[in-house]
Image (spheres, rainbow, N blue to C red):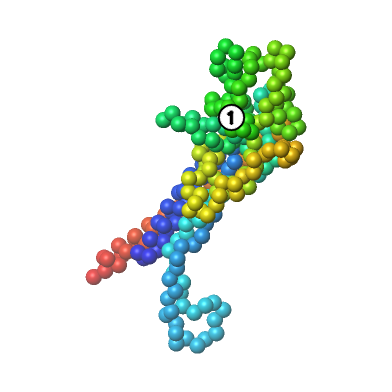
Amino acid sequence: MIRNMVTATNTMNQLQQQLDLISNNIANSATTGYKQTTANFNSLLHQQVQNQRGDQAPRMTPDGLRLGNGARISQSQLVGTQGSLQRTDRELDFAFSTENQYFKVLVQSPDGTSEQNFTRAGGFYLTPVNDDEVMLVDGQGNGILNQNDELIMLDGPVDNIQLQDNGTLLVESGGVQQTVELGIVDIQRPQLMDRVSSVYLGIPDNLAELGVEAGELMVQMEGGIRQTIGLEQGALEQSNVDLSKAFTELIEVQRNYQFHSRAVSISDQMSGLVNGLR
């Protein structure tokens, strides 16, 4: 009975984490560029009890009993499938049409430090820097980087922005044209990336422990391979969360949680009956 309670409570703790993942997916179902996360489960260590050594009868199953200890989340997997594109006809809205390609963005931390992150949320804006310059930023106010990892500064005021086929912006300002190469990477191993927020991915700090080099995580879209960039202007990529599927999974996990909660309750009742015997 105590083993039943331990097994159930171990699994309940992991089911709570899966509920949190599903709830986060649902909450971000309308977030531009959001990629959902799924949970994969594995069984915990089990104990093999050989209690039928003298039984010579034929069996279809292995001898003895296998007593488990519940299940745990073995991996939280980022699902990088393409989200649907929504037309906005706004010249500063950009949407990737190819999976695993991300913009470079310089994210400012509350402590004043900055770190390069990656995002597929392409709703950009122009913010004044001084009387003659504006900076390209995302919806959070963080600066967008060019291919040389520099903040994109434009001579203002900007009259027109056109996207070229290779992820290059042609900017017209007061009759003068500027050319800017958007900083874009192709993330080869998204499962190793840290989810910094709902729309930002970052490079993990423990790459050495993982036995991975930064160059293995992503490919810089430079030179000739920029022709493979899939980017559309005047559109935004929607979240890839399927709400109907997410709510179905939510109900399944809730019922599974209730089942294990009931197992704890029944084991507690049985323990009470045994302790009450005279």
Residue 165 visible in the picture? yes
In the rendering, at what x and y percent does residue 216 appear? 60, 49
On the rendered structure, is 154 left or right of 172?
A: left
In this rendering, the answer to whether 19 lies above or below 172 is below
At x 49% / y 51%, what residue is drawn?
208
Front position in the image: 227 or 55 = 227
On the rendered structure, is 248 left or right of 73?
A: right
At x 58% / y 43%, what residue is drawn?
36
In the rendering, at what x and y percent does residue 126 appear? 60, 20
In the rendering, at what x and y percent does residue 22 appear? 53, 44
Q: Image quadrant of residue 85?
A: top right
Q: Image quadrant of residue 60?
A: bottom right
Residue 138 visible in the picture? no
In the rendering, at what x and y percent does residue 141 appear? 54, 25
At x 70% / y 21%, what residue is drawn?
178
Front position in the image: 242 or 55 = 242
**Residue position for label 1:** 150
At x 55% / y 45%, what residue is drawn?
193
Q: Image quadrant of residue 142?
A: top right
What amino acid is at disc 1? Glu
| The C terminus, quarter of image | bottom left
